[in-house]
Amino acid sequence: MEIKKNLKALDIKISRLATDLGVSRPTLDAYIEYYEKGQPIPNEGYQKIFEYLFSGEEMSSIEFAQKYDYVKRIMLADARSGAEKIIHEERATRLHDNIKQALDTGTIDSHLVEFINLFINNRNNELVKNIYMYFNYANGFADLSQREVELKEKALYSQLAKLFSNYNNDSIECLDEYYNRLLDKNKQLIEAKKIKVNDTAIVEYIKSQLNASNELDIEKIRQLIESREDK
Protein backbone atom coordinates (compact mmCIF):
# COMPACT_ATOMS: atom_id res chain seq x y z
CA MET A 1 0.00 0.00 0.00
CA GLU A 2 1.20 3.51 -0.83
CA ILE A 3 0.44 5.08 2.53
CA LYS A 4 0.61 8.76 1.61
CA LYS A 5 -1.50 8.23 -1.51
CA ASN A 6 -4.11 6.33 0.47
CA LEU A 7 -4.18 8.94 3.22
CA LYS A 8 -4.66 11.67 0.65
CA ALA A 9 -7.60 9.76 -0.80
CA LEU A 10 -9.08 9.63 2.71
CA ASP A 11 -8.50 13.39 3.09
CA ILE A 12 -6.09 12.85 6.00
CA LYS A 13 -3.16 15.24 6.26
CA ILE A 14 0.26 13.80 7.07
CA SER A 15 1.02 16.69 9.46
CA ARG A 16 -2.16 15.99 11.45
CA LEU A 17 -1.36 12.28 11.54
CA ALA A 18 2.11 13.04 12.89
CA THR A 19 0.64 15.26 15.61
CA ASP A 20 -1.93 12.63 16.61
CA LEU A 21 0.75 9.93 16.78
CA GLY A 22 3.04 12.13 18.86
CA VAL A 23 5.97 12.20 16.42
CA SER A 24 7.53 14.88 14.23
CA ARG A 25 6.72 15.08 10.54
CA PRO A 26 10.26 13.94 9.52
CA THR A 27 9.99 10.99 11.92
CA LEU A 28 6.63 9.97 10.45
CA ASP A 29 8.03 10.26 6.92
CA ALA A 30 10.92 8.00 7.96
CA TYR A 31 8.52 5.46 9.52
CA ILE A 32 6.44 5.40 6.32
CA GLU A 33 9.56 4.87 4.24
CA TYR A 34 10.71 2.02 6.53
CA TYR A 35 7.32 0.33 6.34
CA GLU A 36 6.86 0.66 2.57
CA LYS A 37 10.33 -0.82 1.97
CA GLY A 38 9.56 -3.75 4.26
CA GLN A 39 12.10 -2.63 6.85
CA PRO A 40 11.27 -2.75 10.59
CA ILE A 41 10.36 0.57 12.19
CA PRO A 42 12.86 1.34 15.01
CA ASN A 43 10.01 1.54 17.51
CA GLU A 44 8.10 -1.73 17.98
CA GLY A 45 4.96 0.09 19.12
CA TYR A 46 4.74 2.14 15.93
CA GLN A 47 5.56 -0.96 13.90
CA LYS A 48 2.41 -2.59 15.32
CA ILE A 49 0.38 0.56 14.58
CA PHE A 50 1.49 0.62 10.95
CA GLU A 51 0.75 -3.08 10.55
CA TYR A 52 -2.72 -2.58 12.02
CA LEU A 53 -3.54 0.50 9.92
CA PHE A 54 -1.85 -0.19 6.61
CA SER A 55 -1.31 -3.94 6.16
CA GLY A 56 -4.46 -4.54 4.07
CA GLU A 57 -5.83 -3.21 0.84
CA GLU A 58 -7.14 0.31 0.47
CA MET A 59 -9.92 0.91 2.99
CA SER A 60 -12.87 3.22 3.23
CA SER A 61 -12.80 6.33 5.39
CA ILE A 62 -15.18 4.67 7.86
CA GLU A 63 -12.97 1.59 8.20
CA PHE A 64 -9.88 3.73 8.66
CA ALA A 65 -11.63 5.94 11.24
CA GLN A 66 -12.62 2.88 13.27
CA LYS A 67 -9.09 1.49 13.23
CA TYR A 68 -7.56 4.89 13.94
CA ASP A 69 -9.80 5.40 16.95
CA TYR A 70 -8.55 2.08 18.37
CA VAL A 71 -4.95 3.12 17.72
CA LYS A 72 -5.37 6.37 19.65
CA ARG A 73 -7.25 4.76 22.55
CA ILE A 74 -5.24 1.55 22.99
CA MET A 75 -2.06 1.25 20.94
CA LEU A 76 -0.56 4.73 21.09
CA ALA A 77 0.42 4.61 24.78
CA ASP A 78 2.70 1.60 24.17
CA ALA A 79 4.24 3.24 21.11
CA ARG A 80 5.02 6.47 22.97
CA SER A 81 6.45 4.49 25.87
CA GLY A 82 8.75 2.71 23.43
CA ALA A 83 9.78 6.02 21.89
CA GLU A 84 10.66 7.41 25.33
CA LYS A 85 12.67 4.27 26.07
CA ILE A 86 14.67 4.73 22.85
CA ILE A 87 15.32 8.37 23.74
CA HIS A 88 16.52 7.41 27.23
CA GLU A 89 18.79 4.71 25.79
CA GLU A 90 20.25 7.15 23.26
CA ARG A 91 20.84 9.72 26.01
CA ALA A 92 22.52 7.09 28.20
CA THR A 93 24.78 6.08 25.31
CA ARG A 94 25.70 9.69 24.58
CA LEU A 95 26.38 10.30 28.28
CA HIS A 96 28.65 7.25 28.46
CA ASP A 97 30.53 8.32 25.32
CA ASN A 98 30.87 11.91 26.55
CA ILE A 99 32.20 10.80 29.94
CA LYS A 100 34.70 8.43 28.32
CA GLN A 101 35.89 11.13 25.95
CA ALA A 102 36.18 13.65 28.79
CA LEU A 103 38.23 11.18 30.86
CA ASP A 104 40.49 10.36 27.92
CA THR A 105 41.17 14.04 27.26
CA GLY A 106 41.50 14.95 30.93
CA THR A 107 38.67 17.51 30.81
CA ILE A 108 36.67 15.89 33.63
CA ASP A 109 37.61 15.17 37.22
CA SER A 110 37.82 11.45 37.99
CA HIS A 111 36.14 12.13 41.34
CA LEU A 112 33.06 13.37 39.47
CA VAL A 113 32.97 10.12 37.51
CA GLU A 114 33.22 8.14 40.76
CA PHE A 115 30.31 10.18 42.12
CA ILE A 116 28.21 9.42 39.04
CA ASN A 117 29.06 5.72 39.25
CA LEU A 118 28.14 5.71 42.94
CA PHE A 119 24.65 6.96 42.11
CA ILE A 120 24.24 4.57 39.19
CA ASN A 121 25.36 1.52 41.16
CA ASN A 122 23.09 2.41 44.08
CA ARG A 123 20.16 3.82 42.12
CA ASN A 124 17.69 1.41 43.79
CA ASN A 125 18.68 2.55 47.27
CA GLU A 126 15.83 4.64 48.69
CA LEU A 127 18.04 7.46 49.99
CA VAL A 128 20.14 7.68 46.83
CA LYS A 129 17.03 7.69 44.66
CA ASN A 130 15.44 10.50 46.64
CA ILE A 131 18.64 12.56 46.54
CA TYR A 132 18.95 12.38 42.75
CA MET A 133 15.21 13.00 42.38
CA TYR A 134 15.62 16.16 44.47
CA PHE A 135 18.08 17.48 41.89
CA ASN A 136 15.63 16.53 39.11
CA TYR A 137 12.87 18.51 40.83
CA ALA A 138 15.15 21.43 41.71
CA ASN A 139 16.23 21.75 38.06
CA GLY A 140 12.80 21.21 36.50
CA PHE A 141 13.58 17.83 34.95
CA ALA A 142 10.61 16.22 36.73
CA ASP A 143 7.25 17.58 37.93
CA LEU A 144 7.06 17.36 41.73
CA SER A 145 3.41 18.49 41.76
CA GLN A 146 2.40 15.34 39.88
CA ARG A 147 3.65 13.04 42.67
CA GLU A 148 2.28 12.09 46.04
CA VAL A 149 5.28 12.72 48.27
CA GLU A 150 5.60 10.73 51.49
CA LEU A 151 6.40 12.60 54.69
CA LYS A 152 9.91 11.14 54.91
CA GLU A 153 10.70 12.24 51.33
CA LYS A 154 9.21 15.69 51.96
CA ALA A 155 11.40 16.07 55.05
CA LEU A 156 14.51 15.16 53.04
CA TYR A 157 13.64 17.54 50.18
CA SER A 158 12.98 20.40 52.62
CA GLN A 159 16.26 19.80 54.47
CA LEU A 160 18.22 19.69 51.20
CA ALA A 161 16.52 22.89 49.98
CA LYS A 162 17.41 24.65 53.24
CA LEU A 163 20.97 23.31 53.15
CA PHE A 164 21.72 24.56 49.63
CA SER A 165 19.98 27.86 50.30
CA ASN A 166 22.14 28.45 53.40
CA TYR A 167 25.26 27.43 51.49
CA ASN A 168 24.53 29.89 48.67
CA ASN A 169 23.81 32.64 51.22
CA ASP A 170 27.01 31.94 53.20
CA SER A 171 24.91 31.22 56.27
CA ILE A 172 25.54 27.49 56.55
CA GLU A 173 26.53 26.12 59.97
CA CYS A 174 29.31 23.61 60.61
CA LEU A 175 28.13 20.65 62.68
CA ASP A 176 31.34 19.44 64.31
CA GLU A 177 29.90 16.10 65.47
CA TYR A 178 28.81 15.09 61.96
CA TYR A 179 31.96 16.46 60.37
CA ASN A 180 34.06 14.29 62.69
CA ARG A 181 31.93 11.29 61.80
CA LEU A 182 32.68 11.99 58.14
CA LEU A 183 36.39 12.20 58.90
CA ASP A 184 36.31 8.84 60.68
CA LYS A 185 34.38 7.11 57.90
CA ASN A 186 36.63 8.58 55.24
CA LYS A 187 39.74 7.42 57.12
CA GLN A 188 38.35 3.88 57.45
CA LEU A 189 37.58 3.67 53.73
CA ILE A 190 40.96 5.07 52.71
CA GLU A 191 42.75 2.60 54.97
CA ALA A 192 40.63 -0.26 53.65
CA LYS A 193 41.84 0.54 50.13
CA LYS A 194 45.42 -0.04 51.23
CA ILE A 195 44.68 -3.54 52.55
CA LYS A 196 44.78 -6.34 49.99
CA VAL A 197 42.04 -8.86 50.69
CA ASN A 198 41.19 -12.26 49.24
CA ASP A 199 37.85 -13.68 48.13
CA THR A 200 37.36 -15.46 51.46
CA ALA A 201 37.55 -12.16 53.33
CA ILE A 202 34.92 -10.67 51.05
CA VAL A 203 32.57 -13.61 51.57
CA GLU A 204 33.09 -13.46 55.33
CA TYR A 205 32.32 -9.75 55.36
CA ILE A 206 29.07 -10.30 53.43
CA LYS A 207 28.06 -13.09 55.82
CA SER A 208 28.75 -10.96 58.88
CA GLN A 209 26.72 -8.08 57.49
CA LEU A 210 23.76 -10.32 56.65
CA ASN A 211 23.83 -11.94 60.07
CA ALA A 212 23.98 -8.56 61.77
CA SER A 213 21.32 -6.56 59.94
CA ASN A 214 20.33 -8.17 56.66
CA GLU A 215 21.68 -5.03 54.96
CA LEU A 216 24.84 -4.70 52.87
CA ASP A 217 27.11 -1.69 52.51
CA ILE A 218 27.54 -1.82 48.73
CA GLU A 219 30.27 0.82 48.74
CA LYS A 220 32.26 -1.18 51.30
CA ILE A 221 31.94 -4.36 49.21
CA ARG A 222 33.06 -2.47 46.11
CA GLN A 223 36.12 -1.22 47.98
CA LEU A 224 36.97 -4.76 49.10
CA ILE A 225 36.66 -6.10 45.57
CA GLU A 226 38.91 -3.35 44.23
CA SER A 227 41.51 -4.30 46.88
CA ARG A 228 41.63 -8.01 46.02
CA GLU A 229 45.10 -9.56 46.20
CA ASP A 230 44.97 -10.87 42.65
CA LYS A 231 43.91 -7.56 41.14
Image (tube, rainbow, N blue to C red):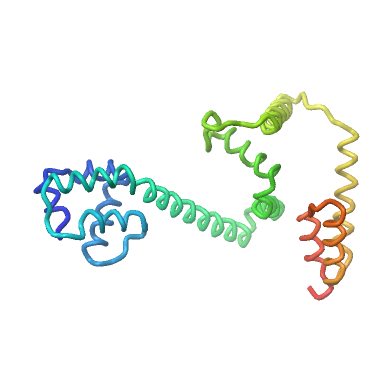
Residue 168 shows up from this direction = no
Estimate the x, y position of residue 193 in percent, counting from the top left.
85, 61
Q: Residue at the location (62% across, 62% down)?
A: 104
- Say which residue appears at 56% left-offset and 35% top-offset: 139
Q: From the viewer's side, name the closer residue of 152 and 117.
A: 152
Indicate the position of residue 153 as horizontal and vertical percent values. 67, 33
173 shown above or below 220 = above
Nearer to the camera, 40 or 137? 40
Compared with residue 176, is residue 117 higher up or lower down, i.e. above or below? below
Residue drawn where x is 58% and y is 31% of the image:
148
Q: Position of residue 170 (x, y in %)?
A: 75, 25
Horizontal relation, residue 216 to residue 128: left or right: right
Instruction: Residue 111: give x, y in percent of width and height.
Output: 72, 52
Is 192 placed left or right of 23 in the picture?
A: right
| Any part of residue 91 in sight | yes
Quarter that holds the N terminus: bottom left
Quadrant the C terminus occupies: bottom right
Residue shown at 71% from the left, 26% from the top: 162
Instruction: Say if 134 sits above or below 110 in the image.
Output: above
